[in-house]
Amino acid sequence: MINVKFNNGIEMPILGLGLYKITDKKELENTLRWAIEAGYRKFDTAQFYNNEKELGEAIRKIGIKREEIFITTKIWNTKQGYNSTRKSFEESLEKLNMDYVDLVLIHWPGQKKERYLDTYRALENICQSKKAKSIGLSNFEIKHLKDIFAHCNIAPVLNQIERHPNLQRNELIEFCKNHNIIVEAWSPLARGKIFDNKTIIDIANKYNKTPAQIILRWNIENNISVIPKSVTKERIEENINIFDFKLDKNDIEKINSLENGYRIGEDPSIFDF
């Protein structure tokens, strides 16, 4: 496994498991067990996913040491604001039954500047209290990031964004890199929508890999963290088996040409709540 290094010196596995809305207790436990056996050590949850409690229980049942894993959670939209954020974060810790998380993010910025600035101020307080080792953002556009930089005392370490071959977000990624912020791709496989693309299939055949492995490798070679979701043992193993090959420059350029603006989620530049 390759690690990325945050601007605060802390390291994080470049690949992890997304846990979006996996709420069935047994399914989550099985998923986690398969992932740990396959070598995953990073797990991405959120208040909105409604599975923090189940994740904490599964980790304890499996018996892996807390310090051996990296846990991310996120503050949901309805919990934003300074006091609400601090309260909801304590509730997340209680559900996880943990003393700290490795990373906590603001899930969405929305368009109310004072709200996300107050929320970020709460994250800084949480970080200072050592209950989160690092703090960051999710779905923040350049305009939102500039607001954070203008007011923050602790720099965000990461921005988690929708990113896949059809939505590459190069300008935003360049901005993040120039400000020492790691980019992490949610829905890096575009929920499988791109698996039947001829360019991806041809490249996959060339390397004797699957389309998913090619897309994940393409991200990693750009130093972009990925958190693909799966509840299938074979897919979980497949998604981590991407560290034994490298893409040719020509193949990377072919994937780069697949940008078409197709978006899975909301557009953060206009989405509000």
Image: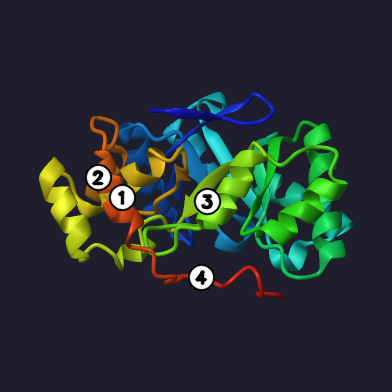
Q: Residue at the location (55% across, 61% down)?
A: 49
Of circles 1 and 4, the one toward us is 1
Q: Upstream in the sequence, badge 1 or badge 3?
A: 3
Q: Is residue 121 left or right of residue 95?
A: right
* Nearest-to-viewer mark from 4 and 2: 2
Please determine whether, in this image, residue 204 is positioned above or below residue 115.
above
For disc 4, the neighbor class at 10 Å (few under 14, some 14 to 19, many from 20) is: few
Classify mark 2: residues with Cα within 10 Å, few (<14), some (14-19) or many (20+): few
**Real-space Cα distance between discs 2 and 1?**
5 Å
Q: Residue at x 30, y 34 (%)?
A: 38
- Amino acid type of disc 3? Glu
Question: Of helix, strand and loop, which one carries label 1?
Answer: helix
Identity, as a three-letter code, of the amino acid under mark 1 = Glu
**Marker disc for residue 250:** 2
Q: Which mark is residue 54?
A: 3
- Circles 2 and 1, Cβ within 8 Å, touching? The answer is yes
- Contact, CB < 8 Å: mark 3 with mark 2? no
Quadrant where the C terminus is found in the figure: bottom right
* Cα–Cα span, label 1 and label 4: 25 Å
**Apparent side of residue 50 relative to residue 83 in the rendered image (left or right):** left
| Residue 253 circle label | 1
Residue 256, picture quadrant:
bottom left
| Residue position marked by numbered label 4 in the rendering | 265
Q: Specify whether 126 is left or right of 222.
A: right
